[in-house]
Image (cartoon, grey):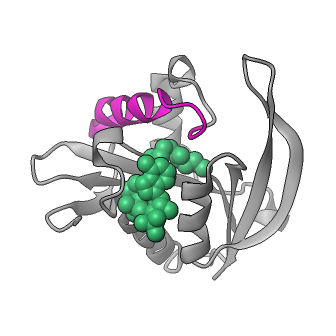
Amino acid sequence: MSAGVQVRLATSHDVDAVLAVHRAAAVTPGGLARAPEEISRAYVEQAIGAPGAVSFVAVGPDGAIWGEIHGRRESVALFSHVMSNLTVAVHPDRQGLGVGSRLFEALIGHARTMQPPILRIELAAGAGNPGAIRLYERLGFQHEGRQVARGLYPDGHFEDDILLGLLL
Ligand SMILES: CC(C)(COP(=O)(O)OP(=O)(O)OC[C@H]1O[C@@H](n2cnc3c(N)ncnc32)[C@H](O)[C@@H]1OP(=O)(O)O)[C@@H](O)C(=O)NCCC(=O)NCCS
């Protein structure tokens, strides 16, 4: 299904396209933590280019960026074998085609080659995002805990965060 989709490392030339994908994905509540108006150019520039950051994009056969994933090595020495701050977004028109899985495979494969080694990848998902949690489970992430009432939506309802980790 995602045949014809190329996954490659992101560059600074991808900022506008990545911004557009994240904003489009953020329009649907219950997925990305940030609302569309919180997804700024500076946020994407950091996601792609901050020290220790790793970002992959999925480019469709039409040449457009269909999805992006990023994570970052922890900067504190004690945690520097950990990749965290993980976020993935696939354009709503391209979800369910295997693009998210491909992005994860690229990120995990890259993490395995990083020096000094990355030994752990961690992420959090809203409890109301079972599709994403299923994807993480299938990739081998283990449930590590639950942060109660971590999210508070504008309508006043709370959502727990589910913590997941993958040991490499
Ligand atoms: C979650 C997301 C990255 C998955 O990417 P994708 O390309 O749709 O995923 P894939 O096609 O590789 O499918 C893998 C799994 O993702 C889940 N999934 C598929 N479409 C989905 C959708 N529209 N919304 C949520 N999860 C979905 C399913 O569990 C699927 O596995 P299944 O086919 O066994 O049910 C993507 O749907 C997305 O960008 N959602 C909005 C943003 C978001 O929720 N990000 C994660 C925050 S923790």
Q: Is residue 123 above or below residue 138?
A: above
Image-based side of 77 in relation to 137, left or right: right
- Which residue is rendered at x = 84% and y = 39% of the image? 150
- The one nearer the camera, 98 or 155, is 155
Q: Is residue 104 above or below residue 19?
A: below
Image-based side of 45 in relation to 13, left or right: right
Residue 61: percent from left, percent from top: 11, 54
Residue 46: percent from left, percent from top: 53, 37
What are the residue bounds of the magenta stretch? 13-32
* Quadrant for the N terminus in the image: bottom left
- Which residue is rendered at x = 78% and y = 48% of the image? 161
Residue 125: percent from left, percent from top: 67, 51
- The one nearer the camera, 104 or 76, is 104
Q: Is residue 69 visible?
A: no
Inspect the magenta stretch and tell me whether residue 50 lies in it.
no
- Which residue is rendered at x = 18% and y = 52% of the image? 60
Q: Is residue 65 above or below residue 121?
A: above
Residue 13: percent from left, percent from top: 27, 38
- Which residue is rendered at x = 61% and y = 79% of the image? 140
Magenta: main secondary structure equals: helix
- The one nearer the camera, 160 or 55, is 160
